[in-house]
Amino acid sequence: MGPLITLEEHYLSSSLNEDPALKTIYSMFPSHQLAKLRDLGAQRISDMDAGGVSLQVVSHGPGVGTLDQCQSANNSLAASVKQSRSRLAGFATLPMGKPQEAAEELERCIKDLGFVGALLENHYEGRYYDDESFWPVFEMAEKLDTVLYIHPAFPTGPLKQTFKGNYPPQTEIGLGMAGWGWHADTGLHILRLFGAGLFDRFPKLKIVIGHMGEMLPFQLDRILGGEKRLFEAMKRGLRQVWDENLWITTSGMVGLGPFACLLQTTKIDRILYSVDYPFSSNEQGMRFLEEVRKSGMVTEQQLEKIGYKNAEVLLKVKVTSEDV
């Protein structure tokens, strides 16, 4: 199968962990996950080896910090990347509450720290990025020809209320997170960005979303069928944007059903393997790839594209089997 590159793999910086709001979030995480989130050394590399991962692109877990916090976290990550001897790469964490500062920090991380992109939470305190005040970040990403990975975020405000119901609190929390809300809201965000004209304003943008497309592949035909009623006329239609501006990772999803849907709607060059470490394990990911191979759904050459070759092109990196 060759080497593997994974793109949605998380860590936790002490620079952001002191924030009281973030401490509340991370108090919900099991201790073994917290230990793995805090490790950017031997344990992480060992886990990568166990799942055949040659290069892991590391991004911060849930939570958005101030400029100082983000700079400190990014500097520490850059040092760990350097120490890893080409086993790790970095996605920047950005202070999205101050978009111009975020754009400047993105530029610093790409030019000075050698990062391969940035990971953005799906919203900033309930505000979505179709709001043009956030667009300096997207403008900078296009200028730098770099990647922005839009990742699910915890629901806040009115959205959080939609998950309340006649069931225990843990059900409410779960439905708002991986059980439904994270993915539906991130998929909707991509449609909001399209509807706001972001991709016409910045036609060379490179946006990555995870979890086999955040529900969009299943809905894509229906959305395209109603596109003229849903959206004002754009220079480039949603199908073109899907094919040219979006990449989809498999992070956290290990089923052949959603993968089949993804294959039916998305060019093979736009599909990227990922794990969602440490919330999913590299071994789970490897077993999924073996199931894909046995299924005959893709050729060996296509599987290699998904496993690492597409990521090499997108991120401008290079790996070999010797990296494991």
Image (cartoon, grey):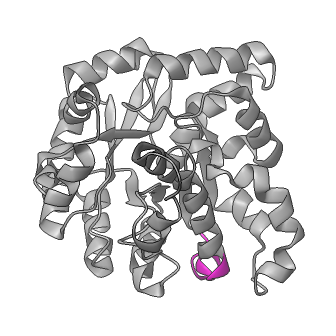
Q: x, y (%) of residue 249?
A: 58, 42
Q: Is residue 8 above or below residue 17?
A: above
Closer to the camera in the image, 49 or 295 = 295
For residue 228, which quarter of the picture?
bottom right
Residue 187 seen: yes
Q: Residue furthest right?
A: 225
Q: Please report the bounds of the magenta region as a residue range.
A: 195-204
Q: Residue furthest front?
A: 166
**Viewport quadrant of the N terminus:** top right
Q: Residue at x 69, y 60 (%)?
A: 244
Q: Residue at x 21, y 63 (%)?
A: 65
Q: Residue at x 57, y 76 (%)?
A: 202
Q: Is residue 211 magenta?
A: no
* 67 displayed left or right of 311: left
Q: Is residue 172 above or below residue 238?
A: above
Q: x, y (%) of residue 139?
A: 45, 77
* 303 displayed left or right of 307: right
Closer to the camera in the image, 216 or 143 = 216
Q: Is residue 202 magenta?
A: yes
* 179 displayed left or right of 148: right
**Viewport quadrant of the C terminus:** top left
Closer to the camera in the image, 128 or 51 = 128
Q: Residue at x 71, y 60 (%)?
A: 242
Q: x, y (%) of residue 81?
A: 24, 37
Count up the numbered dots: 0
Q: x, y (%) of residue 184?
A: 60, 57
Residue 1 seen: no
For residue 201, which quarter of the picture?
bottom right
For residue 137, which quarter of the picture?
bottom left
